[in-house]
Image: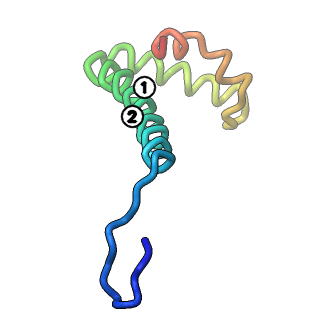
Amino acid sequence: FEYGKSNKKQKPVITDEDITAQAFFLGGFYTVSILMIFPSYELAVNPDVQEKLSKEVGETLKRYNGQLTYEGLTSMKYLDMVIS
C-alpha cells in the first residue's frame, strides 16, 4: 500500500503475481486439509480400524525407541492401507 502526501489511503494495487501467489498458497492448504479430514473421519466412524492402527503405531514406536523415523513410517503397512 502506498499513502499519498495527504495521508488519505489509496486503494491497493493487486497484480497478477499477487493473485497467483494467493492461489498457490490457499490451494496448498486446501489439499492438505482434505487429506487430513477424510482419514480422520474414517477413523472416527470405524473404531476397530482406529484401534488396529493405534496398536501398529505403538508397536512401531517401541521398536524404534520412541522415535518416529522414516524406516518406522515405511514399515507400517496398516497405516499405508488406511491412508491409501
Q: How many marks?
A: 2
The image shows residue 39 at horizontal and vertical percentages of 38, 22
Q: Amino acid at mark 2?
A: Tyr
User: Which amino acid type corresponds to the residue marked 1 in the rendered image?
Assistant: Leu
Query: Up-down: is 45 above or below 24?
Result: above
Examine the image and state in which quarter residue 14 appears: bottom left
Residue at 66 percent of width and 29 percent of height: 62
Residue 29 x/y as whole percent: 43, 38
Q: Quadrant of residue 2?
A: bottom left
**Would you place residue 55 above or below residue 23 in this image?**
above
In this orientation, which residue lies closer to the viewer: 1 or 56?
Answer: 1
Residue that numbered label 2 is attached to: 30
**Residue displayed at 66% across by 34% down:** 68
- Mark 1: give few (<14), some (14-19) or many (20+) Cα within 10 Å: few
- Give SS at disc 1: helix
Secondary element at tag 2:
helix
Q: Among all residues in the image, which is located at the extreme left?
A: 45
Q: Where is residue 80? Give x, y as percent.
A: 55, 13
Horizontal arrangement in the rendering, residue 74 relative to residue 24 (left or right): right
Q: Earlier in the sequence, mark 1 or mark 2?
A: 2
| Residue bearing mark 1 | 35
